[in-house]
Image: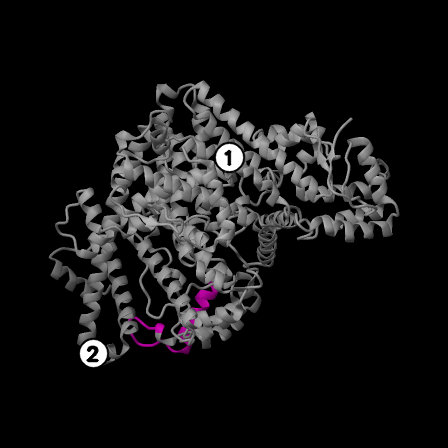
Amino acid sequence: MKNECRTAVEGVLGRKLTDKEADLLEQQFIKASRELPQEDIKAWKSMSDEERAEAIADRAIKNYTDQHIKEVTNLINDLEIREALEHELTSHSKLNPLEALNRKLVMFTDQSGIQSVEHNIQAVEVRYLGALADVFSKTQKGLGYLIDADKVKLLVKEIFGKPSGDAEIAGLAKSVQDVLEQLRQHYNRYGGDIKKLANYGIPQSHSHYKVIQAGEGEWIKTTFPMVDRSKYRHENGKLMNDAEVKEVLKGVYQTISSEGHNKASVQAHLVQSETDLPVGFNMQALHQHHREVHFKSADDWVAYQEQFGEVNFHDLLSNHIRRMSTEIGMMQTFGSNPEKLVKQLGHDLLNKMMQDPKYVKEHRKIQKQAKLVQKHYDELAGQALPVDSNLAQVGGMLRSWTVATKMGSAFITAFSDQATMKLASEMHGIAYTKVFGKHLKQFKNKEERDFAISIGLGVREMSNALVRFGDDDLASASTKLASANTKTRKIANAVIRASGLNHITASAKRAFGASLMHHVSNLNSVKAWDQLGPQDKKMLEGGGIKEDDWTLLKQIDRTEAPSGEKLVTNKDIFNASDDLFLDTFQVDRTGYSAQELSDIAFRLKEQLANKYMNYVYTESDSAVLSVGARESTFMGLGRERGTVSNELTRFFFQFKQFPLAMITRQWTRGMAQGTPQEKFVYFAKLFAYTTVMGALVSQIQNLTQGKDLDDPTTVDFYMKAIVKGGSASFLADALSATSDPTERSVKDFIIPAAFKDVMSVGTMVSGAGEAYLTERDSSYGAEAVNTIKNNIPFQNLWYSRLVFDRLVIAEMQELFDEGYRERKQRRQESNYNMSYWWDLDNASIEAPDINIRE
């Protein structure tokens, strides 16, 4: 700031400005001089120099004042959040403060009463993803496996203000615009500062690889004609000339090509790219730097995305929603600088506990818990950045390919979810028949499905079929390997969708979630808090619902479901009157504007909506096992991603997530029961229900593999049932690997699925090859066909694999090794007492029978 300007301002203020204040004011003057011409260029041109100077000064002072107020507000809010968190964490009756902080971050099922930010993030994310359900579904083709590029182009043009003449496209465009604007406002309500830009279309995507491949000169040459020149102005509002705009684009190129490392804020905080959350970074001004390329039209945006874009339209929207939801959820719980608060709080709690005589014998335990706090935060915030991104991409690609080639029959295994759903239903006093009935309706009734999605149930599965496997990576094409990884994940997604696993998982979560919401809403309608039975109160308090929440829920209007049931939804809470919440929380309205009161009411509503949906999501994720941030952190064993040890660990756990989730979700809940008798009853039911369902799964798998039904009176059959049911977790899996009558051994438990075929090939080409083949009475040709078949996507789909195996693979193996199939069947019948209703060599096909052992 010039000395004469500084002196003038100091004269008005009646005091000296600090250097920091002078710098901030100068930045606001520069910002105002750019904003005003962009907002109304005609009005700007009509002003005299004096009027422009006055307008700039007024805007600068307003911006400075608003920013100062926001910073002070954020500071006060952050202090209040920290104080409330410390009280919650240090006053828990059963958990030490660090244990409580870990539960505040990620989902635990031990009914501690602490709700996780993991599910707060989910509550925000599914609200916006659900609002775009029609956008995703109506811009697909080919049974939902492909994106309708022509329709997407029309939609993008409509978003940029170019009418398509199609009412449906116009409606979809409005949905996208509304969601993006609501996300911006939502972010700002919790301390963010994203300004609304005129003619803003949709987020941009830049492929690091494509941009650097083009080179700086070619990228600028291609991009320059696409930009909206009216957005590029000097501090005085004058338009930049060609050379100056190109200089701005040069800076953008350097940011993209260096993956953000040229930015001072990024260098200071050691982040990998602009799309990642800066470490210890105040989120107030985050996202402002994403908007330096302003396209003049939809055609230009589309052309740029086709040439330099990183991801497709669907991934672009879902990535944006997930990033914003993560940041919003973090700020809701931990303030404007979430990582700083979590790190400082974890450090301070550890120091106090290390000096507390009460924990003198638990130092190693609490040190591990303190490390877990950081690991959980990094996993949740997407900051578990790889040391070697190429190694991480290769690892992710191989795991996705393994899913695509090995998991086509997981739909049948998912039947065992009915066991945990029944147990969860009983815990809540819900009739299991009701839950199962809703599950069936989800398959055949589109109205029921759409309603469940609209209230936030089973939404994540709609956009990512790999959610259940803990695959929550953002789509990327920033490098060749990243692009290959993303494409492989899409193939895996397609296989899981084709198998029906995605649908059965989503429908199970929707059925249980809707049943639980109706149960809670019905209880809430007829019973006051002190009238609740001990089990109902135990479940509600253990899930984080308190008496004040219960009382407030009573005053929320209900939504009628297609089935006629009335239940409280998150939408009902947001649709409630502002006065209800302002009065309930006794907000002093003095000095607040109508907009400020509306913002306060919104935050109070969201506090209740998040509590309610957090409870529903925790119970649903216990009933239908899936992999969350806690399990993903454990599978990395605390090691940094992109290291050999971490990637090997992830390979080892790839298809062991569900045994792990059984421990972290069901065993943890069982151990959380009050008395030894309650613990015994819980585990007895868990074991019984899962074993029954495991028996059913085992017999269905036999039929889809061409085998006769197993004799249900044998020990081997019950071992299979226990393994397939999953209640014994790793123990049953390890024991099964040594005694399973399917030619498996302990190495099948230890060696990751992705490496088994590699090991087999290695064995065959080594000196042990002849012994390997002799043991199986096989040949190189037959085993080569097996290896190739095992690595073809879609070949393992449960409803087509038998036909493919008998009509294609069997014939190919006969070409290389005549009689191979017949020898294999005789060996299995002799050694393992197996029998087939459809012979391996296609010699006969009979009705399935029960293979009774003599």
- Quarter that holds the C terminus: top right
Q: Position of residue 7 (x, y in %)?
A: 16, 62
Task: Note whether 107 is above or below 231 in the view shown.
Answer: above
Mark 1 crowdedness (10 Å alpha carbons): few <14, some 14-19, many ≥20: many
Residue 253 makes an appearance in the image: yes
Mark 2 crowdedness (10 Å alpha carbons): few <14, some 14-19, many ≥20: few
Range drawn in magenta: 231-254
Residue 413 found in image quarter:
top right
The label number, if any, that marks residue 47 in the structure image: 2
Find the residue positioned furthest to the right.
Answer: 818
Amino acid identity at mark 1: Thr
The label number, if any, that marks residue 420 in the structure image: 1
Task: Note whether 45 is above or below 98 in the view shown.
Answer: below
Write the residue at 39% across / 47% down.
123
Q: Position of residue 53 (x, y in %)?
A: 20, 72
Amino acid identity at mark 2: Met
